[in-house]
Structure formats: C-alpha cells, structure tokens
Image (cartoon, helix red, strand yellow):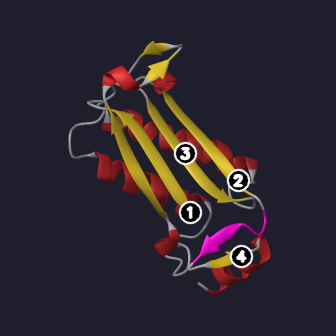
C-alpha cells in the first residue's frame, strides 16, 4: 500500500522525514488492526518527496505544506471511524514533528482507492477478495 509523503523543505527538522513516514505507516496498520501482519507490513511501501518552498502551494500561493496520500484497495479506510481516527493521528504526527510550526490547516491527507482487481503485488493482479484472504493468513 503506497504512501506518498510530500513536504516543503524545512517543514520538518532535517532527517526526521523517515521517522514521519514510519509513524504514518505504523498508524495506518494500527487503525486497520494489522500491526505485525506478515502479509501487509512488507507491502506498506512509498516515497518521501521534499520540495523547495517555491514548489509547494496553498491558495495558489507559495506556502509550506504537507501532503499525506495513500493508494489502497477499496476496503482500506472504508470505515468512518478509521478515516476520522487516522486522519486526525496523521495530521498530529506531522504537526508535532514540525515542533508545532506547521499549522494543521497546512496538512492534507487523502486516500485513493484502486479499482478492484488492479492491485498488483509481485506481478499478480489481485482482487479485493484475494487481498483479504492473504491478509487473513498473515
């Protein structure tokens, strides 16, 4: 499940971006009851993009920001309690790691759902049902 963390340079103390990524990933697993799951854990993947202040925007103007975006199967983040809880926790993680300097209003979280059957792991196109079966074994 890819996580893309995009930050304006300087929003977090240099070197803490990896810690932010790990905390966001751990929180996603926790909210889905998958902490330690042997199938899901190694499939939490992603990237960190740190952009200059001239390349991040809010309200069409340059601004320090953080974007947290997950690409997941349709059954992930489908429960309202998980949505609300994760987004609040993820926002707090970035806000706290910024030393309170990045306002919560400058932190966005979104979830993109993949079409059923288009989730590829190890070259295999998996349906939501197949993913669920694999997770249950983990």
Quadrant containing the C terminus is bottom right
Few, some or many C-alpha atoms within 10 Å of disc 1 (few <14, some 14-19, many ≥20)?
A: some
For the record, the magenta segment spans: 116-121
- Percent across and percent down for residue 100 are 34, 27
12 left or right of 55? left
Q: Earlier in the sequence, mark 2 or mark 4?
A: 2
Residue underneath mark 4 = 126
- Percent across and percent down for residue 88 are 55, 39
Q: Earlier in the sequence, mark 1 or mark 2?
A: 1
Distance in Å between CA atoms under marks 1 and 2: 10 Å
Secondary structure at numbered mark 1: loop
Residue underneath mark 3 = 69
Distance in Å between CA atoms under marks 2 and 4: 14 Å
Q: Earlier in the sequence, mark 4 or mark 3?
A: 3
Q: Earlier in the sequence, mark 4 or mark 1?
A: 1
Q: Nearer the viewer, mark 4 or mark 1?
A: 4
Residue underneath mark 2 = 113
41 left or right of 64? right
Distance in Å between CA atoms under marks 3 and 1: 10 Å
Q: Earlier in the sequence, mark 2 or mark 3?
A: 3
Quadrant containing the N terminus is bottom right
Residue underneath mark 1 = 1
Distance in Å between CA atoms under marks 4 and 3: 21 Å
Residue at image point 50% right, 42% down: 68
Quadrant in the picture for residue 31: bottom right
């Amino acid at each position: 499940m890819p996580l893309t963390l995009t930050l304006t340079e300087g929003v977090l103390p240099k070197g803490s971006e990896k810690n932010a990524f790990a905390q966001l990933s751990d929180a996603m697993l926790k909210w889905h009851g998958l902490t330690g799951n042997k199938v899901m854990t190694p499939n939490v993947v992603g990237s960190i993009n740190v952009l200059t202040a001239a390349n991040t925007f809010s309200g069409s103007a340059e601004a320090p920001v953080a974007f947290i975006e997950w690409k997941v199967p349709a059954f992930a983040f489908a429960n309202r309690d998980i949505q609300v809880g994760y987004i609040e926790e993820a926002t707090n993680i970035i806000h706290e790691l910024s030393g309170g300097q990045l306002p919560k209003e400058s932190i966005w979280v979104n979830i993109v759902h993949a079409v059923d059957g288009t989730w590829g792991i190890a070259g295999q196109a998996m349906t939501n049902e197949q993913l669920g079966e694999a997770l249950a074994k983990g």
